[in-house]
Image (cartoon, rainbow, N blue to C red):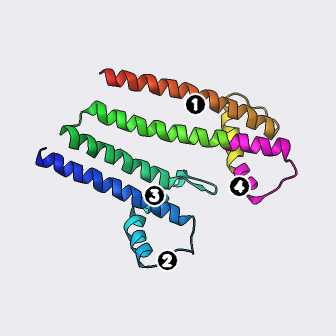
Amino acid sequence: MSPLQAVFQFLAAATSVYMLLIIFRVLLSWFQGRMNGKGIEILYKITDPYLNKFRNISWLRFGMLDFSPIVAIALLGLVSQIFTSLAVSGTLDPISILAYILQTIWGFIAFFINLFIILMIFRLVTLLFFSDWHHQILFSIDNILYKAVARILGFFTSKTMKFSRGLAISALILIVLRVALAFAFAYLFRFMRGL
């Protein structure tokens, strides 16, 4: 192993450790007010400057949902993969970089589509079988889904329809889109491996 490969191996390991610290910091944010101490304070000082760069991106927030930590972690994963590839081979060809970037992009797209499918099916079930159930979380989910359903259906029709019907149609459209994109990206990755 060359000295440069050793440097890249160290950078890959350091990036992976930092990614684990970010994940731990995100998990701690779910228990705000309950965790304190010098170690937690040091963790915040190490991780918050990086996370804050993503928290300031407005389109990563959908109502009560904040996807900025996911983007921050995925970017670190991408950097770690690149460093690992450089540590193993000593070089990184443009096709590999493009493949890493496309895999990360597909991961984001798949995650968001899956999330919206799950939210739509969950909300559809609550509307059909628990119509008298009212909770703040349902209102928050509705705020997110109203916009998503309007945008999805806006591609196909300008007619208004009942929210439950719009949810069902939108969920089906997203399922078909998810499957089609999975095949498209799988074909693209196979093509890129052949280059």
In this figure, which residue is indicated by the disc labeled 2? 36
Q: Earlier in the sequence, mark 3 or mark 2?
A: 3
Instruction: For the residues labelled 1 and 3, say whether their Cβ atoms are less than 8 Å apart.
Output: no
> How far from the left and from the top, in percent, is residue 63?
64, 55
Residue placed furthest toward the left? 2
Magenta region: which residues? 119-143
Q: Which residue is mark 4?
A: 140
Q: Position of residue 56 (x, y in %)?
A: 48, 59
Say which label, 2 or 1, has the lower sequence index: 2
The amino acid beneath tag 4 is Ser
The residue type indicated by label 1 comes to Arg
Marks 2 and 1, how far apart in space? 42 Å
- Cβ–Cβ below 8 Å for labels 3 and 4? no
Depth order, front residue of 124/28: 28
**How far apart in space, not on screen, are marks 1 and 3 (Cα)?**
27 Å
Confirm or deny contact between disc 3 and disc 2 (CB under 8 A): no
Which residue appears at 32% of the width and 48% of the height? 80
Do residues under tags 2 and 1 come within 8 Å of each other at their CB atoms? Answer: no
Q: Residues within 10 Å of mark 3 (few under 14, many from 20)?
A: some
Q: Which residue is mark 1?
A: 178
Whole-percent x and y of residue 118? Answer: 66, 41
Q: Amino acid at mark 3?
A: Ile
Q: Secondary structure at mark 3?
A: helix
Residue located 33% across and 24% down the image? 193
Residue behind mark 3: 23
